[in-house]
Image (cartoon, grey):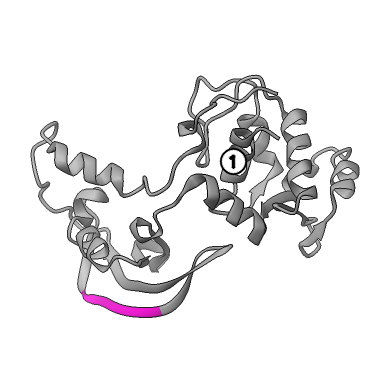
Amino acid sequence: MNRVLRQWLLNLAIDFPVHFGLLPSLLDGNDREPQSLNVKALRSFELDEGVARLMELAESGLIQFFHQPALGETRAISTSEVLVLRRRTGVEKELSFQLTDAGGRAWESAAEPHWRRMQGGFATPREENGRLIGWDWTLFSQDREHLMATIGWWPVLNHGEQIDLRSITWEFAEAYLVKYWKRLPNMHLVNFESGLGAPSMPGWNPGNTPEWFTAWSIARSTWYRQPWEMEGWSPKP
């Protein structure tokens, strides 16, 4: 399989398993418009062609297919089962695929990630009397200073959302799961509560954001090479 195409397909699933229901909008034969997830659509690739290439990745041990019926538990399935199940109307929401350990390593070999620059996180909503009042956050990175800078600029980065400074706690983990397929050593974790109160004053007037801040904000999410930055984009069937 074309190296760039393989990387594009693996790149679909680096953050979470991908349901087949998302594929039609991504494999629509048109890369002129931005798409969902972390990807750019492929010109000349239609849904059936993309699924066939996913089958090749599964046969190579780089991805695994799963089936979760409405009233059943999720189970791993073979490529032949995928072909059978796809004949059913509406089955797309029951089918998904995700990277295997080998698939993660294959993605890394082409993406060349700078793991130390990566910052991840998640939040759970906090409610009071059925009303959303804020979030409970966990952020993680191997770079402690990177986390400190993010917390310092939090209101600017998150539209005025305020951190309760009294709620901040720091931890150090010798190993931490940063992706569902990837564990990293020497991770810093910060937990805190944020509120939806009155926004703070912006750091600068609208339209006058410094170039250094814009560059820093973009760099926070550019810790690996995207498939469309590789030589040979856009691959052909």
Task: Give the number of marks.
Answer: 1
Q: Position of residue 187 (x, y in %)?
A: 38, 72
Quadrant housing the N terminus: top right
Relative to 189, 231 lies left or right = right
In this rendering, position of residue 38 left or right of residue 69: left
Placement of 27 over or under 149, stated as above or below:
above
Instruction: Tell me the crowding category of disc 1: few under 14, some 14 to 19, or many 20 or more residues within 10 angstroms, Cα based.
Output: many
* Residue drawn 61% across the image and 32% down it: 26
Q: Which residue type carries mark 1?
A: Gln
Q: Establish if 20 lies above or below 64.
A: above
Q: Residue at x 91, y 43 (%)?
A: 84
Relative vertical location of residue 87 with respect to residue 174 in this rendering, above or below: above
Location of residue 226 with respect to 196 vertically, above or below: above
Nearer the observer, 36 or 201 = 36
Question: Which residue is tagged 1?
Answer: 7
Residue 164: x %, y % from top left: 22, 70
Q: Which residue sits at x=50%, y=41%?
A: 38
Q: Position of residue 190 (x, y in %)?
A: 31, 72
Picture coordinates of residue 55, whole percent (x, y): 78, 42
Quarter occupied by the C terminus:
top right
147 on left or right of 110: left
Q: What are the residue bounds of the magenta stretch?
A: 166-173
Task: Give the residue at x 49% y 33%.
Answer: 230
Is 207 in front, or is 71? 207
Snapshot quadrant of residue 122: bottom left
Secondary element under disc 1, as helix, strand or loop, is helix
Question: Would you say the magenta stretch is mainly helix, strand or loop?
Answer: strand
